[in-house]
């Protein structure tokens, strides 16, 4: 099946999958030859691409390898009724190995990050979509494409898995979620370690499933087969790898200082000359976008110690999955004065223990360090690690620090707080 689209926009022959109105298009670009084969997703209005930032968002990518002087099987999935989820895939052949996949474009009713402003913001909820390939040849002029077959189905495969396909460091206490076609009446979920997927019985009643007994440091795979009026549509196989630790706090989810301070409360009750509270806890973000808790200290003034405490929503069990070590990543400043650096755990019954870092100059470290504390130290002191209610991180010991009697502030940054098995070596990055 051949089609010629002339430079003036006129069409000779049949143009399968290409429509001049408002459509989603998977664009297969052979324009720069087989070494530079590229696929992308486009939102088109009257033959005009109204997108921006497609490449940066993974909607536009070069196909791996160089052996592209050949045919492929192309697939465009358009699913949903607002938002609309659009995904392009290229296979070796029908039902064959996946060669390349774009990120899923999520088209909402607002102006999306990839979308030109004020140009067709609303998603396309009806009409056609298609696959358009271009190969600019000298003869004939224009773009020449050959299609062996073109067809559509009423129910594309499920999309937008969470955890994302290929995700790593996934916590063992996680939910599986996905987006499926509105015509789906039921579904079959396959789940298990790599090479050992099993049918989940009973099947989920919706698009959420919480697996039990996930193991740390393992790779799992899963698939959602949708069942509808037209039969069963087999899903794609997705994978994720669980983290080798249990996260207590990572600080990434906090949106701003206010959100962080609502969870981590400092012990200083001071106001400025206008009656505003003087803050000592801040959400810090580095050049790579990593977030951490910044704790400032003015221990030249009473109470000569500064600390921040998180009270958990309910007592949490820190003995699960065989973990034996509490690990805290931190970095300080070389100009800091020496301060005792400590962590306190308290259980639901009020039993607590404060443990100090062995070196008061630890707060002067200019690189990220890891402080590992055996949970057995808390158990020995009578703290019930199966029922932890509060965690406190602090600087100082109730004695003047020696800082100048002015606005001088020392600070320390807390990154990942996690629990590890006894034989695990925690990462030192925040």
Image (cartoon, rainbow, N blue to C red):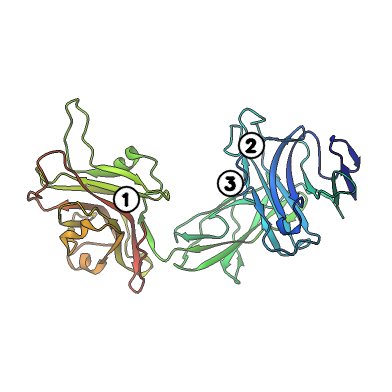
Q: Which residue is mark 2?
A: 82
Residue 216 x %, y % = 44, 67
Task: Tell me the CA gap for discs 2 and 1.
Answer: 37 Å
Marks 1 and 3: which is nearer the front? 3
> In this rendering, would 297 be left or right of 370?
left
Of the residues under marks 2 and 1, which one precedes in the sequence? 2
Specify the quadrant of the image occupied by residue 360. bottom left
| Residue toward you, 325 or 135 | 135
Whether label 3 touches label 2, CB < 8 Å: no
Using the image, tell me which numbered label, if any, was put on residue 314: 1
> In this rendering, would 90 be left or right of 265?
right
> In this rendering, would 12 be left or right of 128?
right
Mark 3 Cα-neighbour bin, 10 Å: few <14, some 14–19, many ≥20: some
Identity of the residue drawn at 21% across and 64% down = 378
User: Which residue lies most toward the top here?
Assistant: 274
Residue 48 x %, y % = 73, 34
Observer able to see residue 72:
yes
> In this rendering, would 80 be left or right of 293?
right
Identity of the residue drawn at 36% across and 56% down = 430
Q: Secondary structure at mark 1?
A: strand
Of the residues under marks 3 and 2, which one precedes in the sequence? 3
User: Which residue lies most toward the right here?
Assistant: 13
Q: Secondary structure at mark 2?
A: loop
User: Which residue lies most toward the bottom here?
Assistant: 423
Using the image, tell me which numbered label, if any, was put on residue 57: 3
Mark 1 Cα-neighbour bin, 10 Å: few <14, some 14–19, many ≥20: few
Of the residues under marks 1 and 3, which one precedes in the sequence? 3
Task: Tell me the CA gap for discs 3 and 2.
Answer: 20 Å
Marks 2 and 1: which is nearer the front? 2
> Is 31 rendered above or below residue 357?
above
């Amino acid at each position: 099946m051949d089609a010629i689209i002339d430079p003036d926009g006129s069409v000779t022959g049949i143009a399968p999958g290409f429509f001049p109105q408002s459509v989603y298009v998977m664009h297969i670009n052979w324009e720069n030859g087989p070494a530079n084969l590229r696929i992308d997703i486009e939102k088109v209005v009257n033959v005009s691409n109204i997108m921006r930032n497609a490449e940066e968002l993974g909607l536009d990518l070069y196909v791996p390898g160089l052996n592209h002087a050949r045919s492929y099987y192309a697939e465009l999935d358009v699913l949903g009724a607002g938002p609309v989820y659009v995904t392009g895939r290229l296979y070796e052949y029908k039902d064959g190995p996946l060669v390349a996949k774009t990120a899923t474009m999520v088209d909402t009713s607002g102006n999306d990050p990839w979308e030109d402003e004020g140009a067709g913001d609303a998603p396309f909820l009806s009409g056609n979509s298609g696959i358009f390939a271009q190969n600019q040849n000298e003869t004939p002029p224009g773009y020449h494409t050959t299609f062996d077959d073109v067809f559509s189905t009423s129910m594309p495969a499920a999309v937008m898995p969470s955890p994302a396909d290929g995700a790593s460091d996934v916590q063992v206490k996680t939910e599986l979620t996905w987006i499926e076609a509105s015509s789906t009446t039921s579904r079959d979920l396959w789940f298990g370690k790599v090479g050992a997927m099993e049918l989940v019985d009973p099947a989920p009643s919706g698009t959420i499933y919480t697996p039990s007994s996930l193991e740390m440091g393992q790779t799992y795979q899963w698939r959602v087969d949708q069942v509808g009026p037209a039969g069963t549509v087999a899903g794609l196989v997705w994978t994720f790898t669980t983290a080798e630790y249990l996260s207590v706090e990572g600080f990434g989810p906090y949106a701003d200082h206010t959100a962080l301070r609502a969870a981590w409360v400092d012990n200083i009750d001071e106001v400025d000359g206008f009656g505003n509270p003087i803050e000592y806890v801040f959400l810090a973000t580095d050049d790579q976008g990593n977030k951490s808790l910044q704790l400032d200290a003015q221990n030249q003034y009473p109470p000569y110690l500064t600390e921040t405490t998180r009270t958990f929503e309910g007592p949490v069990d820190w003995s699960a999955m065989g973990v034996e070590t509490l690990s805290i990543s931190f970095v300080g400043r070389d100009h800091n004065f020496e301060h005792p650096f400590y962590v306190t755990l308290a259980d639901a019954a009020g039993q607590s223990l404060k443990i100090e870092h062995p070196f008061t100059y630890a707060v002067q470290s200019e690189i990220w360090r890891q402080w590992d504390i055996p949970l057995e130290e808390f158990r020995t002191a009578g703290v019930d690690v199966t029922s932890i209610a509060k965690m406190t991180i602090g600087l100082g010991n109730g004695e003047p620090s020696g800082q100048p009697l002015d606005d001088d502030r020392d600070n320390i940054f807390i990154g990942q707080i996690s629990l590890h098995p006894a034989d695990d070596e925690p990462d030192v990055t925040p």
